[in-house]
Image (cartoon, helix red, strand yellow):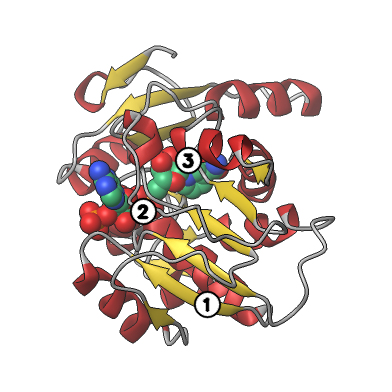
Amino acid sequence: MGEAFPWQEAPNADFCVIGDPVEHSRSPEMHMAAFEVLGLPYRYVRVHVPKGEASQALEHLRDRGYVGVNATVPHKEAAFEWAEEPDARSSRIRAANTLRLGTREATNTDGPGFLYTLNGLGLPRGARVLILGAGGSARSVAAALSDAGFNLAIWNRSPERVFRLLAETGVPAAVEDSPTLLGVRLVVNTTSVGLHGDRLPLDWSRCDPELVAYDLVYGNTPFLDQARALGLRTRDGTELLVAQGALSLE
Ligand code: NDP
């Protein structure tokens, strides 16, 4: 857990990550380490922005002279809405994680970063993938997996959000009323449930022994604990943090 500034009290800095919660974010340490290696004199901080205040906060940060912002939960859709020059990838999924404030440009590096982290897992093209959640990062993950030829199913606590995701992104996927792991080779938890230590309504009893369980949250989550207890291969969000962060830094 690191220091987070309320957006109204954002300090002198060049870059920040905005989120709610945001104290858990490791982006400042990661980007500061990269700036140091690259010999760049920038400062990157955590800024706490409550839900519904992203647009106001982004205007304030722009006025304060911030150059770039990374948006995390729950602001990726609001960050996209704020941008006036979104690129094609963020426009398709209507969610942005990287903003250049001066020009109001936006992109989203979660999808390509996520695909990069699947290297080495041996997942065959056409394999069935279950995505849990339908928020900003689910959109990036769904679009990237669909473009890479996987067969998608999506479950979300609020089903109307899945239908909106499918309609707005054009991603083909089955909509699940309750999440089933039967025949699934990769299950990706894109919900923020792990941040609060809550559990998802998953029945692990009939899953494939080859199943890979992937949680976008970094560190241990009840979801990954359950998968490990069954001897399944797992991935947490650490590699994705690095992969999306490297693209964002670029
Ligand atoms: P959003 O706020 O856009 O979406 C949150 C999702 O979580 C929604 O599907 C929401 O469902 C669901 N959810 C929240 N609480 C619960 C609950 N108690 N039970 C069931 N579902 C719940 O968030 P993002 O998509 O931006 O981010 C999701 C997670 O992914 C975050 O934890 C974030 O930190 C992590 N992440 C990590 C990255 C990394 O680099 N490792 C990169 C991107 C994201 P509903 O629609 O019903 O509210």
Residue appearing at x 45%, y 83% in the figure: 173
The numbered disc on residue 152 is 1
Image location of residue 59, percent across then percent down: 25, 44
Query: Quick one: label 1 or label 2, which is nearer the N terminus?
Result: 2
Residue appearing at x 66%, y 43% in the figure: 234
**Given the image, on which type of amino acid does mark 2 rest?**
Lys
Q: Is residue 140 above or below residue 226?
A: below
Q: CA distance from mark 1 to mark 3?
A: 20 Å
Q: Which secondary structure lies at badge 3?
A: helix
Q: Residues within 10 Å of mark 3 (few under 14, many from 20)?
A: many
User: Image quarter for residue 124?
Assistant: bottom right
User: Image quarter for residue 30?
Assistant: top right
Depth order, front residue of 95/145:
145
Indicate which label's residue lies in the foreground, 1 or 3. 3
Indicate which label's residue lies in the foreground, 1 or 2. 1
Q: Is residue 65 visible?
A: no
Question: Going by the picture, which residue comes out furthest to the front?
Answer: 205
Would you say 25 lies left or right of 212 here? left
Q: Is residue 208 above or below residue 9?
A: below
Depth order, front residue of 214/78:
214
Q: Residues within 10 Å of mark 1 (few under 14, many from 20)?
A: many
Q: Is the distance from the Cβ of mark 2 to the nearest ligand 1 atom less than 8 Å?
A: yes
Q: Is residue 208 above or below residue 248?
A: below
Q: Is residue 194 above or below residue 177?
A: above
Q: CA distance from mark 2 to mark 3?
A: 23 Å
Q: Is residue 81 visible?
A: yes
The numbered disc on residue 76 is 2
Image location of residue 87, percent across then percent down: 50, 71
**Given the image, on which type of amino acid does mark 1 rest?**
Leu
